Amino acid sequence: MDINNFPWLTTIILLPMLAALVVPFIPDTDGKTVRWFALAIGLIDFSLISYAFYTQYDFANPGMQLVERYTWVEALDLNWSVGADGLSMPLIILTGFITTLAMLASWPVTLKPKLFYCLMLIMYGGQIGVFAVQDMLLFFLFWELELIPIYLLLSIWGGKKRLYAATKFILYTAGGSLFILVAALAMAFYGDTVTFDMRSLIAKDYALNFQLWIYAAFLIAYAVKLPIFPLHTWLPDAHGEATAPVHMLLAGILLKMGGYALIRMNVEMLPDAHVYFAPILLILGIVNIIYAALTSFAQRNLKRKIAYSSISHMGFVLIGIASFTDLGLSGAMLQMISHGLIGASLFFLVGATYDRTHTLILDEMGGVGKQMPKIFAMFTTCSLASLALPGMSGFVAELMVFVGFSNSEAYSQTFKIIVVFLAAVGVILTPIYLLSMLREIFYGPENKELTSHEKLIDAEPREVFIIACLVIPIVGIGFYPKMITQIYDSKTLEITARLQDALPTLAEKRIVAEPMATIPLTAPVIESSR
Amino acid sequence: MTELLAQSAWLIPCYPLMGMLLSIFWFPSITRRTGPRPAGYVNLIMTFIAFGHGVLAFPAVWHHASINLEATWLEVAGLKLTLPIEISALTIGAIILVTGLNFLSQFYAVGYLEMDWGWARFFSLLALFEAGMCALVLCNSLFFSYVILEMLTLGTYLLVGFWFNQSLVVTGARDAFLTKRIGDLFLLMGVLALYPLTGTWNFTELAQWAQTAQVDPKLITLVGLALLAGPMGKCAQFPLHLWLDEAMEGPIPSTILRNSVVVATGAWLLVKLEPVLALSPTVMNAAIAIGAVSAVGGTLISIAQIDTKRALSYLVTAYMGLTFIAVGTGQTQAALLLCLTHAMAMGLLVMGTGSIILNNITQDLTQLGGLWSRRPISGLSVAIGGLALVALPPLGGFWALLKLADGLWTTRPVLVAIVLLVNALAAFSVTRTFGSIFAGNRQQMSERSPENIWTITVPMTLLLGFTLHLPIILESLSLLPNWAVLNKDVALLLTWSSIFGISISGVLYIGQSVPRPIQLPWKPLQDLFAYDFYTPRLYRSSVVGGVDLISRVTDWIDRYLVDGLVNFVGIASIFGGETLKYGNSGQTQFYALTITGGAIALIAILLAFL
């Protein structure tokens, strides 16, 4: 077999999906075989991902790699076209990583295990598909495809209000994705050639007016997913009702689809419209950060609290995207990856805590730290990561967004100061709600009412292992961010260069002042050699 | 040999880090058989190695130019990320102080936490503190200093929250983190804003830049104020002083460190940043004002506290206020000297009072008394600690305050008055603490009180010895002023102010001439000091209350307006569907009518648009 022409991405996408079809036929009564099967498939797929990118992917090349293209439905001009570049590759790795861990996290699931793991495996392929496909119609298909398993996972294994939450989730996201279809069709039929291929769509030259409309349509669709205020209200409900593994997927990967698609379509395909929309993104980002942080502080339900904290963190992605600097864009990417890890770990811990206390209401907890020291320690670590402590990935990402934005030449000084200040207010609010949360769960005298009727067992090795898997990259990125930024920085550089051409003020400057040396895409910039 | 040790001084922060990592093996959940104690011994050894390394390396750097190392963390095209390290007499001296005090307090902790189950956690956190402080003094970069300060904030949070099942500990830990974090974030803003101006974060280069810098005064003032906020939080200056008082809920061995050296990290950063801050007179005046308010306020509040540890912690705020004054007037040498003498004296004071608190079970000054005859060693430690803190020759504090006041004498006489006032009040406060514990009649809580086991007494007496020898050490390092040029007026004034404070307090608290409890004639004033100018309440009603209220409002908006709209759409569609289903009458005419009506309406709307 020729290793260079092996269809890596297709295999990676289809393997879990095909495995999902096998699940119903596995002889299993108590769900113990099937979970090992799912975990094994997850591991195999993750190692395939790692191997493929390690051997076949050139990090210095900003272009599309591992490309495969087969005609699927000729009449519709639908192609099975996949590929990976600096934008999608880190997110594909993240997806493989988090989903595999989510399989391990779903060990305690006893209700209909076959269906559960079947859906999880479909999710696995579907999520990677969203990041890997290079055809707009296919993208739409995959985008819709991963909604169905999530809907079922929510409505069968969720909490008390699961049906409400699942319906809200499906209506919201499916409604949003209609805009994707409309915009995709409009773009495909624009101009002389009809094409759904993303590369060709990028190359097309759109009129500004058209771009603005398409941009707005995409923005609505991805604002639901990311989510952006005021289209976020499905998230606290869905997150509030999901079980821990589904939670990890929702927070760890599904939110990132919104950010990924924003960069892939809005920024890459519609750079001229982006110039007009960027200030709006910035304002929405600030609103996200502060509004969600404040709302999170007022939540009495643990899952809803963390859910709002996710919304708050996604605000940084918006600021990074709107910064017009490669450092900011790179920070936005890193923030997505970092939040994928941190969000997944926090939600997993919330699930682990819930398994023991059987309540999510903070007022009913208190003082459980004494009986569950390991969970206490892990929860503290992940909260500190979430509140952007130096040495953890969240800090590096937010710092890059901050530095990138304040170095941006696209905005006036006053505007930049106001935005940075407001974002900093959000950063101060984060420890307020996270530390209060820790205090209410773990600190203080033991809540006798809780400890008398719940058996609070400390974390088992499986749980410690999952958190360790998540914390190691968090700390690794925190101490050595270059490790991760270098695998995608050539791509962000390319996008920013394109964006800056679109920016009228900057483009003029570039002509005058020689190719303006792009500020080196850095890890937490410490010293530029210049 | 010493040369080699000096060259490798960057290893010093690694020793405690190694100790920290090794302690993990003795967490109760990992090793049960040996108990957690080996973690303590491992850390003790590591700290001693760090201390020894520092002491042995010192001769090589003394009177030599500083060694500057550059550790290239990573280097890629266009980006060079370096960690500059400065090994000089000053930094090694600071390391000796930090590791020495760490060694003594870890030694102390062996005795103090005899019965505790959290040794591994506690010692690894102390090691984190130690590593952080050593790294801070060595690193010569503003950015890395910021990162390390944040790590220390984390260390404080975890150490204060050590006994997390006590309710006061909870708020103490959280407040410590939050107040410091607010300061740190402003610092970060300043750090980021400074970079475009200077192009470097190296302190040495920053100082060079500041000499010739031409910057917009408004901008540099803003940046300078932001840079000031970080040390303000660290040094527990008004209005970010709240945390230090609440941090007293942590175990005493960590308090020794916090009160003596950890707070001084803020002062250290301030000293390093002085050239930049000096670019804006407003910033310098702000530093002086903050320092003066903290110094006077801190001592006044300290006098009104009935909790031993809190009485001492407010003195820390006051003395750090004096270093702010020193930096604000450009006297960095005096600031550093003050940090040194204050660290030794304060460490001794906390050790001495801690030794009382441990076996008298109370830290309430009103419940103690008459312990002098039973606790002479602790008594002597507290007494010497107190005297070394204030300006009383020949002990350490005198020389530091003399240097400060001498520098202010001709330029800022008002500040000299403040220094004298603070010194007198501090003298009053330490004498009051001493008197309340050791003089007077025995009370119920101080009826039985033997000296503690050797693991507590030995480090205490060792530090006592060092504190007593500090003037000699200073002399041998030629840090003491020349007798010929000594400003005798200042020296006399300082001495008199100390004697004044000590004697009044002595009459009141040692002499027993006034019935206890001694109160100010005007109750509201007494309460004002006792309750820390009502700062906690002020915060609770303003900032905390405000955030709480706003968050409730946003939650309400989110639930009933934003989400309410969504739910309304849902309910409206259900309602619409439910209502319309009655239209399914089965009569063709009715359908035709509906269609016609709909079509007419549509056309009307279209026409209205066109």
Image: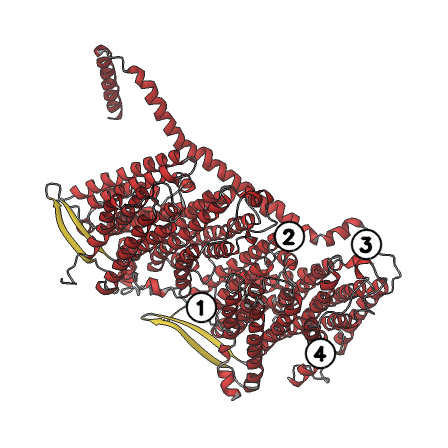
Q: Are marks 1 and 3 on the same chain?
A: yes
* Alpha-carbon span between mark 4 and mark 3: 37 Å
Give neighbour class at mark 1: few <14, some 14-19, many 20+ (Cα, 10 Å). some
Residue in the picture at 65% in, 50% down: B536
| Mark 2 vs mark 4, CA separation in Å | 35 Å
Determine the secondary structure under disc 2: helix
Mark 4–mark 1 Cα distance, whole angstroms, equals 46 Å
Q: Earlier in the sequence, mark 4 or mark 1?
A: 1
The reply to whether discs 1 and 2 touch (Cβ–Cβ < 8 Å) is: no
Chain holding disc 4: B
Mark 4: amino acid? Gly
The answer for how far apart the CA atoms under marks 1 and 2 are is 44 Å
Circle 3 is placed at which residue position?
B520
Task: Say what secondary structure mark 3 lies in.
Answer: loop
Q: Which residue is mark 1?
A: B198
Chain identity of mark 2: B
Residue on which the image places disc 4: B465
In the rendered image, the vertical position of residue A158 relative to residue B408, given as above or below: above
Which amino acid, mark 1?
Thr
Residue B274 visible in this rendered orientation of the protein: no
Report if the CB atoms under discs 2 and 3 are less than 8 Å apart.
no
What is the three-letter code of the residue carrying label 3?
A: Leu
Residue B168 badge: 2
Mark nearer the viewer, 4 or 1: 4
Q: Chain of mark 1?
A: B
Marks 1 & 2 on one chain: yes
